[in-house]
Amino acid sequence: MSRRAVPCVLSGVLALMALACPQALAEETGRPVYEGAGGDPRISVSQPESTSQASGGYVRSIEPSLGPLGDPFGLRPVLKARGIEYSLTYIAETLGNPVGGLRQGAIVEDRLNLRLNLDLQRLAGWDGATVHANAYFIHGTGLSRYYVGNLLATSVIEALPASRLYVLWLDQQLFDGKLGLRIGQQAADTEFFVSQTATLFVNSTFGWPAITGLDLPSGGPAYPLASPAIRAKYVPGNGFSLQAGLYDGDPAGANRPGDDPEAQRLDRTGTNFRTRDPALVVAEATYAFNTQEGSKELPGDVTLGGWQHFGRFESLRIDNTGLPLADPNSTGIGRPLRGNAGIYAIYDQTLYRETGKDDEGLGFFVRAAWSPTRSSLVSAYLDTGLAYKGLFEGRDDDTVGISLAYARLSDDARRSDIDTIILTGTAMPRRRAETVIEATYQAVVVPGFTVQPDVQLILHPGGGIANPRDPEGRRVRNAAVLGLRATVQY
């Protein structure tokens, strides 16, 4: 076994011992109790029973439904008393595109998510400190990568097969929980740019949006990659919270020259722990309203945020001598550009709450982002959607939703296509934007076990690229994606 594999194996063994349950831990340590995705107070009545998104959220375990098999050795209460809590999430799904895309096909993929939470107050008398680890075991083939050819991946769990460490950090709570400092390997998609209502949906862009996933090196510190970071979160009260994270700006080193630019292959185990790349800073401010217990007004929150990457990028249109990259005399090396930046806004709102219920009703979300830097592939992004939990009589825990996401390609990306047409005489489509529309229904079989049929319509896959399999070079056709997901939480 190689030395590089040892940390991953050790993290997997630890993860098999335990998976965090931060809500229960918070209740018993006296720190604030968070039930919402992204580690914030829960404001969405339609946040689903289970989610594949890294931001997590309000969940239940299947353990009570398993009877004596739920905890056959009685380890959970013993470990919990010593400050160790564990659980896991297993997701299996099948997706297919009977219409459109690069070619028609179907895939099966699955992911096992293992987490560990250690309360250092109980274990070592260290007040307010927690250690958290998270590992993924990923299998299967991605539908977007091999069949659809779109930018907004059809599933948030799509990734190359691997057993990898995801995050490993130490969190210290100070000033009665008002200030939290976190250091270690972290992922921005667990806390930043999060909509609680959007956690229902299967398409990856409703987790870590495409504008950051496509503009930042290696996709940014987001599933399935994370990077060393320091994060500070301040919660002064009255619904306000401020947080900022300083991350190594290239989780896998995909910007460096090499034989294999695929980020996930450059960091196969999640243990590269890169610390010498230019930094990425992400910051946001949130105001949550009507979250007090017993409030008759409908809860919601508003978030403003942004990111700045301090590294060097290559132009999408001009080479390092000033010629268009499409020019036959071009060097093929993009002009160096400094930095990548963007701003975003989120509005998450409960529109209707069923009488006498605090977790049933209709929720709405909208997220918008803009990146003015010339290094960006996607310059503008918008997603929105509705979700209703408990819509049907007798199905109080089921959640149904519909959503839309739109990613507009930058001017330089679009102009590079025009350059190619003019300078080479090649007839080809011009890229513009990609849109996804998704409808889904998550049915709770028993608490902790859900089944979720899903339908997606992908408009202009790849932004409207030519299909390399089409001899006439026509655009990749709009794709219809049908899927079924099963999730077990323990």
Image (cartoon, grey):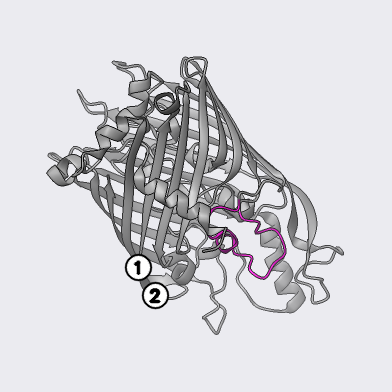
Residue at image coords 49%, 51%: 165
Residue at image coords 59%, 49%: 220
Q: Is residue 454 above or below residue 88?
A: below
* Quarter occupied by residue 83: top left
Q: Is residue 74 left or right of residue 115?
A: left
- Measured in 3D between alpha carbons, the distance from the residue under mark 1 to the one under mark 2, in whole angstroms, is 7 Å
* Disc number placed over residue 96 in the picture, else none: 1
* Contact, mark 1 vs mark 2 (Cβ under 8 Å): yes
Graded by Cα atoms within 10 Å as few (under 14), some (14 to 19) or many (20 or more), the crowding at tag 1 reads: many
**Amino acid, disc 2:** Gln
Q: Which residues are magenta?
A: 252-272
**Amino acid, disc 1:** Gly
Query: Is label 2 in a helix, a strand or a loop?
Result: loop
Q: Which of 469 and 421 lies nearest the eye of the viewer?
A: 469
Query: Is label 1 in a helix, a strand or a loop?
Result: strand
Residue 201 at least partly seen: no
Q: Give percent across and percent down for residue 210.
A: 54, 51
Residue at image coords 63%, 52%: 215
Q: Which of 74 and 113 lies nearest the eye of the viewer?
A: 74
Q: Give percent across and percent down for residue 490.
A: 27, 44
Residue at image coords 67%, 46%: 275
Q: Is residue 20 left or right of residue 75?
A: right
* Disc number placed over residue 104 in the picture, else none: 2
Q: Give percent across and percent down for residue 16.
A: 36, 49
Q: Is residue 378 magenta?
A: no
